[in-house]
Each structure stands twice: as C-alpha cells, then as structure tokens.
Image (cartoon, helix red, strand yellow):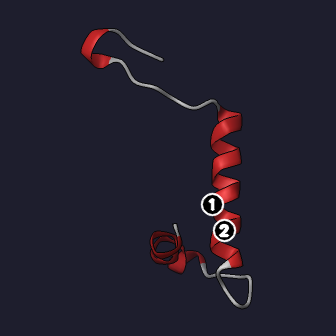
Amino acid sequence: VMGEGNKRVVTLSHRAQVRRFTSDLLRVLKAQASKQIKLSEFPNVYTRVI
C-alpha cells in the first residue's frame, strides 16, 4: 500500500507482476492453434481470451 488518505493505492511486487503477465501470456498462446501470435494482434486476442 502506497500513499495516504484518499491517495492510497495497492501495488503488486515486480515478481507478482511478472508471474501474472507470464500466466496471462501462456493462456493467450495456448488458445491459439499455432501457439504463436503477432504482437500487433495480442491486445485483441488478450481481450477475447482473458
């Protein structure tokens, strides 16, 4: 938790952020038949899969 009063925010540690990103990336790739995706297509596929 960072900040005070109304300005408080909860953040994830770097390790937790990397773990979550890796997990999400694997879910997106597993949803593709070829197990690969163009970087430009990632946002749309991510939204659909997750």
- 37 or 23: nearer the eye? 23
Disc 1 versus disc 2: distance between alpha carbons? Answer: 5 Å
Q: With respect to residue 4, does 32 lie above or below?
A: below
Tell me the number on the disc at residue 27: 2
Position of 15 with respect to 7 (left or right) is: right
Kindly identify the amino acid type of the residue bearing the numbered disc 2: Arg
Q: Residue at x 71, y 46 (%)?
A: 19
Q: Which residue is mark 1?
A: 24
Provide residue 44's location: percent of width, then percent of height.
45, 76
Provide residue 39's location: percent of width, then percent of height.
58, 75
Position of 5 with respect to 44 (left or right) is: left
Q: Residue at x 51, y 77 (%)?
A: 45
Label 1: element kind = helix
Q: Residue at x 71, y 82 (%)?
A: 36
Q: With respect to residue 10, does 24 lie above or below?
A: below
Q: With respect to residue 44, does 13 lie above or below?
A: above
Kindly identify the amino acid type of the residue bearing the numbered disc 1: Asp
